[in-house]
Image (cartoon, grey):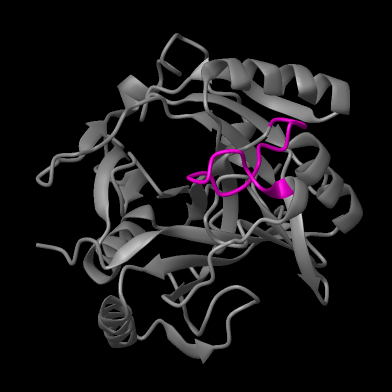
Amino acid sequence: MPPLHDIAHLAHIELLTHKPEESLDFFVRYLGMTENGSSGDSVFLRAWDDYENTTIKLTAAPQPGVGRTNFRASTPEALQRRVAAIEATGLGRGWQDGDPGYGPVYVFTDPDGHEMGVYYETEWYRPEGDLKPALKNQAQAYPGRGVGVRRIDHINYLGVNPKENRDFFVDTLGAMTTEQIVLDSGEIAGTWTTFTNQGYNAVWTKDRTGTSGRLHHISFAVDSRDDIIRAADLALEHGVHIETGPHKHTIQQSFFLYVWEPAGNRIELDNPAARLVLAPDWQPVDWSEAERAKGQAWGLQTISTFHTHGTPPVEGQE
């Protein structure tokens, strides 16, 4: 059995942008996130029902893409177990101080080179003034602006070898594979993994450029399908590029809208509905090439840029 539950959840993600002011406006005004401090070239942002201080660390950089993805361990002992397992793979980089709001973080990479961290010590968010919610079992008052994203849902990496990254997450970190795309050749072209009862927390899909370390998208959860429709209307009003949707995915069945933030990073707005994976002996659902060629759940064909666009961009490939 894999070491289930040593990783509690996907915690927060660093997103890189070469258009920091425009990207910040997108996250605050369109997505409805709240600024919660800054450090150097980074601004810390939070979704309104995140119990921790930071959901997204938005960092100015020469190119867009993903920086460090952080995961919280379930206990101090679980943290030490996962650190030892990571070190055994040779992918560990060592301990670093955490950003404001969380403690020491052990930094490592997946086999594809995406930077990651795992930590345990954290500070719970303490809202003040107008940010105090009416209900004390809610982390922050509903912002009442933009889409109003509730929490981070998942991250989808582009990978040279999705299977290798999947196996690392399962064998080293204790993830469970819930669904995957299996080509006629037997190659794994996409793999969906989870640390929780969500259908998925981390995804790898095949990078057709053969480039390592890139991002496909970051996804935020909203409460209802109506929120997704509203997000599409707001995108029109805010001049946000809609790539595809609203529609329903075949894989995982979430209701989605994909947009690009000003730096070109793809953002998904996602209503996962009530679908949970509760079975401890869940077996991965495999999707064939022929099944995926049918498009999304209600017949919408997958837009071509979904297979070519990623960040940072690869010259001549998009």
Residue 132 seen anywhere in this rendered image of the structure:
yes
Q: Nearer the viewer, residue 83 or 263?
A: 83
Residue 315 seen anywhere in this rendered image of the structure:
no
Identity of the residue furthest to the top in this view = 298
Q: Nearer the viewer, residue 104 or 130?
A: 130
Q: Nearer the viewer, residue 11 or 184?
A: 11
Residue 195: % across, % down: 31, 54
Question: Is 159 contained in the magenta span?
Answer: no
Q: Nearer the viewer, residue 209 or 247?
A: 247
Q: Which residues are drawn in magenta? A: 131-147
Left or right, 255 with respect to 128, comes to left
Q: Does 92 appear above or below 1?
A: below
Q: Does 134 appear above or below 147?
A: below
Which residue appears at 22% of the width and 34% of the height?
A: 285
Residue 21: % across, % down: 90, 54
Q: Does 282 appear above or below 44?
A: above
Which residue appears at 79% of the width and 44% of the height?
A: 28
Which residue appears at 61% of the width and 21% of the height?
A: 227
Residue 55: % across, % down: 60, 56
Q: Quadrant of the N terminus?
A: bottom left
Question: Is 143 contained in the magenta span?
Answer: yes
Q: Quadrant of the C terminus?
A: top right
